[in-house]
Image (cartoon, grey):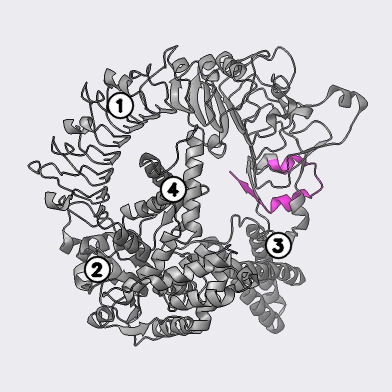
Amino acid sequence: MKDLKRKLKELNGLKEDTESIIRTELQPRKKLKAEVQIWLENVERINGDVQDFDGRIGESNALTRGFQGEDVLKSIKEASEFITQHGKFHGGLVVDNPQWIGQVLSTTNLSGEAVKVCVEEIWHCLMDDEVRKIGVWGMGGIGKTSIMKVINNQLLKETGKFDTVIWITVSKEMSISKLQIDIASKIGVKFSDHEDEATRAGMLFETLSQKSRFVMILDDLWEKVSLERIGVPEPSNGTKLVLTTRSADVCQQVGCRMIKVKPLMEEEAWELFLEKAGCDILNIRGVEPIARSIAKRCAGLPLGIITIASCMKGIDDISEWRNALKELRLRKKSVNGFEDEVFQQLQFSYDRLKNPKLQDCFLSCALYPEDEKIEEEGLIQLWIGEGLVEEMDSMQAEYDNGRAIMNRLINNCLLEVFTEGEHARTVKMHDLLRDMALHIAKSRFLVKAGTMLEKAPDVQEWSMNLEKVSMMRNRWLYIPLEMSPPKCSRLTTLLLSHCNIASIPELFFKHMDALKVLDLCRNPIMSLPISLSKCPGLTTLLLSDCGIESVPKSFFDDTNELKILDLSFNPIKSLPHSLSNLKNLTSLLLSYCEDLGNVPSLSNLGVLRKLDLRGTNIKEIPNGVLSRLFCLQDLIVGETLINGKEVGELKKLQGTLEGRFYDWHNLNMYLEACRGREEPREYIIFVGAVVFSRFLKSASKGVLVRGCNIYNYQIVLPRDIEGLDIGDCIVDCSEEYPLFSRFILFSLSSFSSLISLEIKDCRNMKKLFSPNCVPLNLEMLRVVGCEQLEEIIASEVESEERGMVITEFHLPQLRLLWLSDLPELKSICSAGGVLVCDSLGIIGIVDCPKLKRMGLNLPKLDNVSPSASASANFSLSVRIRPKEWWESVEWDGPQPKSLLDLFVSFW
């Protein structure tokens, strides 16, 4: 019993640690792993068994104690197994709960006592089983959406009350069909294009009826909605409906408990103004009373306060403050009431942009659908096409200028920014700001974007004054073939992407002489109307993914001003010779035109900056073609063979390079030709055969080598390389030197940027790195299938002659070390050497039978005790095959091998 209680004490210590970690990790939308749940139940069971043993042993005789002894031994064995099993809980104790539906939303700080009272009132109604429908109402810009975002996020933490929170943003141009599609996407229901409204409603109703505890939030509802027509069950026990609206009538018609969001009190408004304008304004003599008057004119409206205060931030000239107050006072209130007064406040920020091009950039954002997250790159491309971004020497400089404009609009609270993934940004207009923009441009803009429009507006709506028209993102848009050509001689921008347009009348563009930007992407039009080729001012033509099979021979005869042509993702087999007439063309995008087998006529495109041919069937760019494209800044040709010397002589190629060289010699010619000047910011260079490499996805500057002969005199690499993947190569091993001591490098810093390296199936290579060529910034090292490899970091002859010398090699950034199928590998480091890895998270040793010694130092393990192997502050996964190898290998590092045992899993 003493041994059992000792084991039980250790086991219960692990249980307490585990429960402590669970309290940290078990957040909304998470659940315990099944193995963890079972382990906790088993520990409870053993505790119960031991208590039972204590009671029975006191009452037993000699005979029964013998049988009970067997039970005790069995429990000791079980407890030992559970202690061992605990060490195998890798990757956390919880997983995503697939039954949970909800999304955390970005929020802003809520100001004011009235707002806090409003939040508490909404929360109380949500927790009250008697209240099933809640209507949060108030004027535009008062903060209804911000309040509900806070409520949404709080609901996600209340796992005991609701298990599903569905947030739906309803646009002003609401339709039952769009609402159904939005709800379906949130709850995992998939519609086909054939279901009608009633069928979709039935599918939604069935799915939602199976959820007994959900909250649906309909944000920005403008009119009464029929839950039955949509397919939403009437809220009952455990389910709630919350809507935000500007109309009290909508709340009453839906039958909601009404909660009004009131404006901020005067002092609360002043505090918010100070927060956004900066408290430094109080140090400017005479500014405070003026600033208070400006804040007061915002009438407690948070959106107005934020936009106006943000555009006054950093202004230290009191005359500008006086002028700003004067401008606000001079604005006249229209007969439409307070909503127009809000527009006047918001338009103040627009007017203070002053620069007309900057103002036009803001107005162009309203061409996108309401509540759409607009991709940064696409929006800047639109501005460039419209001529709103100054022309510069490089595409990158123009893009940077566009980004500076975008940041100006963001900093003035005219756009809201979101970060998607690691780098990509999107922006969005607040719906009230979009309304204001459309109000400003109402005589010049026709916008029907994302409104479920099924037929193009009648020709009468295409007025002579129109400058920009957007009907993008309408699922089925029909343009009648008998429609008269719109007489829009001032029209510069026409956006019709994502509309499933099947055909366009031949004369549709006849009167659009001023047209600059036309976006027809993602429409199955297959052929282009001849009138499009007669638009003399056209600079940007976007035709990606249109099913176009051919372009008329004379199509480019009269489009001499064209700068950007995107025909990517089309089944085009060839392009007409008239393409060579486009002497102003700067971007030619033909990516993934899989049937395109011949290089189009490029000889006269002397100002071309970007050429994208990746994913085409073009095998090789003939010699002499690239040398004439001396302005090229981005060359993206994927698997297509290119001439290394010609590419290297493209002096302006400083953006992106992606292409294939025939062999190492061709790569050397490229590097020699571009030696001494700036290399591309991003490059993926294939040498030899082309294969997919997940390993290089993390590197923006990588070289992938397959099926090449590697000789001493041939091996040259770019100086700033981040990723290197070598496989299926014949390595000259006539000398016993490590592969990476034989690279002919421009300097020893050539590996300073290398972050990922994969060596695969180089069957004759015996050694990888020499001691002075270890890449210190390496994050991932993967060596697979190198049949004769003996050492990762080679021994130095002098060290071996002097006897055992302990040498430390540092790879502080290394996160992954994977060694697989290396039958001759004897050591990672030379005898006595230790590899110090501060960041290592994954170690894989698979089928390396001759590896007898592991010289690794993992400093982070110094703070991990055997009873806390699942520490939230340290994550390590050690994957081993076979198990027998791990049991026999010598662990030559400062941390005990028994500690590593806690992180090992066997394959």
The Cα–Cα distance between marks 1 and 3, rounded to whole angstroms, is: 71 Å
Question: What are the residue bounds of the magenta stretch?
Answer: 886-907
Q: Amino acid at mark 3?
A: Ala
The Cα–Cα distance between marks 2 and 1, rounded to whole angstroms, is: 56 Å
**SS for callout 2:** helix
**Count of numbered circles in the view:** 4
Q: Earlier in the sequence, mark 4 or mark 2?
A: 2
Residue bearing the label numbered 4: 376
**SS for callout 4:** helix
Residue bearing the label numbered 1: 560
- Residue drawn 45% across the image and 40% down it: 390
Viewer-closest of 94 and 700? 700
Of marks 4 and 1, the one in the foreground = 1
Could you say where residue 822 lies in the image, as x and y percent from the top left?
Answer: 64, 29
Q: Is residue 894 magenta?
A: yes
**SS for callout 1:** loop
Residue 205 marker: 2
Circle 4/circle 3 CB separation < 8 Å: no
Count neighbours of disc 2 (C-alpha within 10 A) and say few if under 14, some if 14 to 19, many if 20 or more. Answer: some
Circle 4/circle 1 CB separation < 8 Å: no
Residue bearing the label numbered 3: 868
The Cα–Cα distance between marks 4 and 2, rounded to whole angstroms, is: 37 Å
- Is residue 519 at all visible to an observer of this figure? yes
Residue 698 marker: none
Q: Amino acid at mark 2?
A: Phe
Q: Earlier in the sequence, mark 4 or mark 3?
A: 4
Q: Amino acid at mark 4?
A: Glu
Q: Amino acid at mark 1?
A: Asn
Count neighbours of disc 3 (C-alpha within 10 A) and say few if under 14, some if 14 to 19, many if 20 or more. Answer: some
Circle 2/circle 1 CB separation < 8 Å: no
Of marks 1 and 3, the one in the foreground = 1
